[in-house]
Amino acid sequence: MSSKAPDKDAGTPERIGAGITAEGQHVAGTEVPLRLGASAPTAARRGFDWRQYVVYIGFVVIFLVFAVTLGGSGFLSPNNLLNIVSQTATISVMAVAMTFVIAAGEIDLSVGSVAGLASVTAAMAVTQYGLLAGIVAGLLTGAVVGLVNGALVTRIGIPSFLVTLGMLGIANGAAQWITATAPVPILDDTYNSIFGAGSVGPIPTLLIWTLIALGIGHLVLRKTPYGRQVLATGGNEAAARFSGVKTRNIKLQVLLVSSTVAALAGMLYAGRLHSGRFQWGQGDELSVIAAVILGGTSLFGGNGTIIGAVIGSLMIGLINNGLILLGLESSQQEIVRGAIIILAVALARKRSVA
Amino acid sequence: MYTPDEGQITVDGRPVQIPTPEAARAVGISMIFQEFSLIPTLTVAQNIFLTREPRSGGGLLDDREAERRARAIFADMQVDIDPTATVESLATGYWQLTEIAKALSQDASVLIMDEPTASLTANETEALFALVGRLKARGISIIYISHRMEEIYRVADRITVLRDGRLVIAAEAAKITMDQLIEQIIGGKMEGAFAWKQREVGFDGTPLLEVRNLRRGRRLQDVSFKLYPGEILGLAGLMGSGRTELARALFGIDPIEAGEIIINGRPVTIKSPQDALAAGICLIPEDRRAQGLVLDHTVRENMLLPLLKTLDRFGMIDDARGTQLVESFVQSLHIKTDSIFKQVRFLSGGNQQKVVIAKWLAAAPNILIMDEPTAGVDIGAKTEILDVIRKLADSGKGVIVISSELTEVLAVSDRVLVMHSGRSKTELARQEIHTEQELHHVVQSA
């Protein structure tokens, strides 16, 4: 069983109100200007454009529905809620990096397999050479794969869709091969505690990892020159190049980071499940991409929102968790989950201009 | 594309409703779009009959019949296009003609052409005018939308001026002079924006930029020239003469293969836009939509894109300072936008171009290369842009202006360099050129 991600977080509604629109780049500056119309320009200029907030609204609605219908089944128990966050952490972390990739106009389909491969290399290295070696081995696995992806895309010019599709198979095959498809147990308690199973006081480390990824990702995308250059590259590569942006480097870097973060996610799987295994993360690329798009990032590049992506990820986890508690079979869960994702994206769709 | 809130449209005296482009076609109105609506990978014939393909007996598509009919239409238009060629294999001039054939195949009686010559060479433009004449003779009415005054007078029988969505004037072309027309368009007198004034340029010091024997591929074979501080150098030449290639090479988009670039007496190597920027060279590219702007991003983000390094404060973008900077340029260049947070997609062509210009003015270059800075820009914005160019030179910068509109080249340049087949051919001081006709002659015969 690949562990699919469920999730949900109690503390989010505040953040939703915090003035960061689903699309909204610049909340900073002097006063908050009228930004609501920006993505649906034909809409009334001053009107509230709810389309930008679909992921947040959907998140709250789904949460409330489950809270009412499943209140008795332990849905609202702190344990269950923290459990949702923990199980979603890997998807959330990867969604943060994927937002950069998609915002830059590329895609990375290899993240799930890279997570599996890194869980294995990290587990093997921890067992043989100790904690530090394990961490280095895991991250290095991701970095190497990312560098290969990035080089093939930017130096040879193969579309990232194809490069990473191929890499999906290569990474997965490599993980099966070096382990002979067997799980690699991790007995190092420190590793397991840092990467998944532990907690700081009442806060699970997986929640902390999610928050770290969220914080760094959001700041870099919204507030740094680098983030702005990523958005420009995805929005119009030629214009970015004519503006002095090194677009090839940007693309290489987002793919490098995406793989490295995917490796971190694989290490989180390994920590949570006390073992490395090629199946960890299998199929996650689709959940990750769904989370990013649900969050309000355009599949065509040029815009992106990290907070939206994490909320999107939590929403997917929330749905998974609720459907399990409702007693649906896994086949039914998949159908309902798919339908909800399509519905949400349909609602969030910008009205096409002419 | 848009439906009217109020008002009435009549065709042949009958009121009609036009809720969709299909409905317009049904009553005989066809539009030739500024951005072509052809599918590059399909053949000419397939494009002309898209969604209205001739069928053979079994209901299958009959490409042969489509080609036959397309050939007949082209014969009628007296143009020579192979209907079996894919559209992408044609020069862009022929795209336009294919568009027109498409409209004719639908028995259009009213043809709307929006800036049809924007991407045509001089010869293609002539061919288009001839075609317009033949269509007129066949009883087809044409609404010809253009920013180019000379064209309007070439083709139009009557002229209608719209400003800010209102009808300003409608008159017979013979009864209104070009000056009156321009006045109506910009809504006021313009004080000789196209008139050239001699400026003081010191031609004896060290050149700001000197270029010796530049070469790159076939399009750029041997270019040498000098640019002095405070000078505006006009770059004229036919389509394909290497003007744009020169601009791209100097900006490091397509680095040179041989030759020397010397700035303030020091040789520099320019292999990338970053190198060019470091050397103080900026380029306003010829296609603002494809190369100048990220259309989905806001005015502010677009303007600040080249400036991110200077706005860096402890690794973060200094938003307050950025906003201030953008606001000041919006004011000084009179950019019309409700907010600096509006997506540039929704600005008019002229205002978009001003955003591109502001973007590079803010970077404070020493040498600014402008490739067709007023293409597709209304005449009001055009005069403002020409003023910006003059002011920039007055402040001691060097400006290179590439333009196919000789009126414009003559309006601002201190010297004119004429290019031909990738070579710098003729260099003329502005005083030596007495009429536009003279320069036209030099460009054509260079």
Image (cartoon, coloured by chain):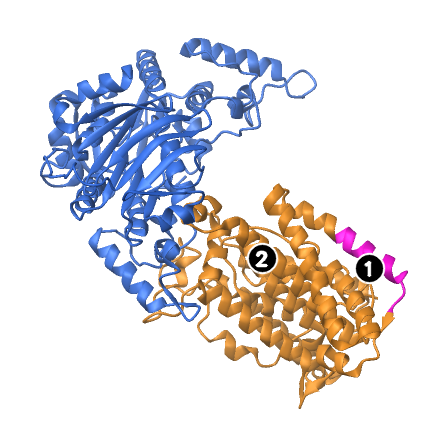
Residue at image point 38% right, 54% down: B306
Q: Is residue B404 above or below residue B262?
A: above
Q: Is residue A321 left or right of residue B293?
A: right
Q: Secondary structure at mark 2?
A: helix
Q: Which chain is orange?
A: A
Q: Which residue bears the numbered disc 1?
A: A175
Q: Earlier in the sequence, mark 2 or mark 1?
A: 1
Residue A306: name its quadrant. Answer: bottom right
Can residue A115 be seen in this snapshot?
Answer: yes
Alpha carbon separation for disc pair 2 and 1: 23 Å
Quick check: is A180 in the magenta stretch? yes
- Can you say which quadrant of the picture contains the C terminus of chain B? top left
In which image quadrant can residue A261 be found?
bottom right
Q: Give the vertical position of B92 relative to A1 (above or below).
A: above
Name which residue lies at 40% across and 53% down: A42
Residue B380: x %, y % from top left:
20, 40
Q: Which quadrant of the figure contains the N terminus of chain B?
A: top left
Mark 2 residue crowding within 10 angstroms, few (<14) / some (14–19) / many (20+): many
Q: Is residue A75 visible?
A: no
To which chain does the residue with label 1 belong?
A
For chain B, the rendered hue is blue
Q: Nearer the viewer, residue B353 or B410?
A: B410
For the record, the magenta segment spans A168-183
Residue at (69% x, 50% y) in the render: A164
Q: Which residue is mark 2?
A: A254
Instruction: Report x, y in % for residue B389.
Output: 21, 42
Residue B24: image location, x then y, percent:
41, 31
Say left or right for A207 vs B377: right
Mark 2 falls within which chain? Answer: A
Considering every residue shown, the one lying at the far bottom of the view is A201
- Amino acid type, mark 2: Val
Relative image position of residue B269 (x, y in whole percent): 41, 43
